Image (cartoon, grey):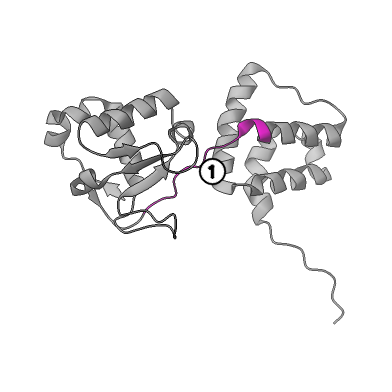
Amino acid sequence: MNIILYSDIVRTHPAFLSPVRVGVLAHLAAFADSAETGTEPNRLPPYSILISPAALAATLTATRAQIENAIISLGKHGLLTVDKTQGLRGEWLIDLAKSSPYMTGDSSLPAPAEVNIRSLMDYWDKMHTKATGIKYMRSQSDYWREQADWNKLYQAMGDEIFHAMDMFFSDIRFSQWNYAFKVFFKSAIRLINKPKKEGWKLR
């Protein structure tokens, strides 16, 4: 959903003295819906979302601690309620009903999923070694840059990312770039969406 905060509210409401809290509330609202969502037995009431603060932080220029502190603080200021006992490990059930006067629209986005970056990197390393015969090496700066890129790809592709890696390393055309990660990052979604070639047909 969209969120509308008029300037006088932003300037006077104590919850909005922190720009981080303003931003976090706007992002949480994007995942909310004014109607019930999900299916039994996991149906959620209106304005409620299940979200991992770590997963949200990974999609933003913020730390997990900053996101968690912002959510808890918004709760203390009466703009939402939090239940940490629901959902999967690391997920919080957040009820934004108290902020509904600021929310409008009837569209919502899927909440980001928590990504096991290590498993993605391990699979990449294995496939790279298999294709090139050379152990994949990454510097510390490479690690942090790749971590952000892996997260972006997984949010867009889910587990299809593993299939994209299989396709990437089985395509000899990518060998001219030494199967570079930056090439995969730009090609992954296109590989998955690429139309399957039809077999030869007798006419």
- From the image, give the main secondary structure of the stretch colored magenta: loop
Asked whether 113 or 80 is in front, the reply is 80
Q: Residue at x 20, y 36 (%)?
A: 78
Q: Which residue is under mark 1? A: 155
Q: Nearer the viewer, residue 193 or 68?
A: 68
Say whether residue 86 is left or right of residue 172: left
Asked whether residue 116 is drawn in magenta, I would say yes
Residue at point 61% right, 32% down?
117
Instruction: Give the image quarter of residue 140.
Output: top right
Residue at 59%, 26% in the rendered image: 145
Q: Where in the figure is residue 46, as x and y percent of width and height?
A: 30, 54
Q: Is residue 118 magenta?
A: yes
**Whole-percent x and y of residue 103?**
24, 49
Query: Which span is picked out in magenta?
Result: 108-119
> Extreme bottom residue here?
203
Binning the other alpha carbons within 10 Å of mark 1 as few (below 14), some (14 to 19) or many (20 upward) gives some
